[in-house]
Image: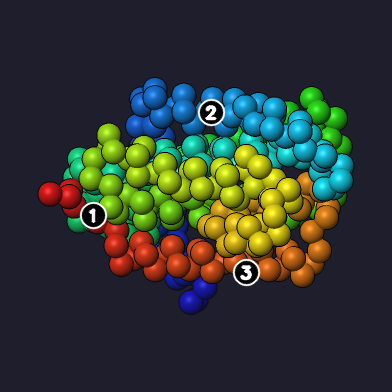
Amino acid sequence: MSGNRVVAGLVPGGRRLRALGRAELTLLGRNRTAVVTALLLPLALPFSVRPAVDKIDLEAEGLSIGTVTLTAAIGFSLLFAVYSSLVSAFVARREELVLKRLRTGELGDPEILAGTALPAMGLGLAQAVVLAVGCTVLLDMGAPPAPYLTVLGVLFGLVLCALLAAVTASFTRTVESAQVTALPLVLVSMMGSGIGIPTQVLPDRLASLCELLPLSPAIRLIQGGLTGHLSGYEALGAAGTALAWTGLAVFAVRGWFRWEPRR
């Protein structure tokens, strides 16, 4: 009986979450700038780092042009399709009083944030799948040695980017300033988390510091699944760091997220 009550309680919550997700997807589709940014930048930016990658002896680092390109493409998708677009979405819904009105209904705070994030996270996941298939075919990569690590890294990346977007939105005053407040994490992640430049080519001390950045463990798992060069101990360490960042981000959202317009 208790199991039936739990299921009965979950069904309405799932319906409300899907309804909010569909509404957010409609709003996302009407924002042409957000759609172009989310769809085209992750596809175009990996080619911009190609000249720098060509100067690296990838084979000596256990890498290939395919694994570097796919890792970069998925990383850019997380940064732009999920993180940057969600910062703008959270701020816009807050300033338009949408979040405040939603809190007066049956939805709980986690459901409101999750429903708002669902379309962007779904887009990021779909892009990761399309990019993986495209790179496998076009760059003749072959099947990844440890696909479960790549999947785990993508999932960690999606959740972390959504949470970090909510944290960033907490101190973002307007939609116009959202791209500015999101820029520091974007730049730091591009340069230090192994998205634009593989961390294997960085000096050891700098690489160790970069491994502690928020998106570094997710990118490390993604790349480790593609190359098969990540040991079980290293994978557990990356997963543990990702969990720690997730916990910190949840704590920050609960303490700092603003549901009413900033004045």
| Circles 1 and 3 in contact, beta carbons < 8 Å | no
Q: Which mark is residue 240?
A: 3
Q: Residue at x 40, y 49 (%)?
A: 165
Comes first in the chain, label 1 or label 3: 3
Cα distance between the residues tagged 1 and 3: 30 Å
Between residues 210 and 157, which one lies in front from this camera angle? 210
Outermost residue, bottom side: 2
Residue 156 lies left or right of residue 166; in this view the side is: right
| Circles 2 and 3 in contact, beta carbons < 8 Å | no
Q: Which residue is mark 2?
A: 41
Between residues 186 and 154, which one lies in front from this camera angle? 186
Please tell me whether residue 42 is drawn above or below residue 63 in the rendered image: above
Numbered disc 3: secondary structure: helix
Q: Tell me, yes or no, if residue 217 can be seen here.
A: no
Q: Which residue is mark 1?
A: 259
Numbered disc 2: secondary structure: helix
Comes first in the chain, label 2 or label 3: 2
Numbered disc 1: secondary structure: loop
Question: Callout 3: 10 Å neighbours few (<14), some, many (20+)?
Answer: few
Comes first in the chain, label 1 or label 2: 2
Cα distance between the residues tagged 1 and 2: 30 Å
Please tell me whether residue 241 is drawn above or below residue 55 in the rendered image: below
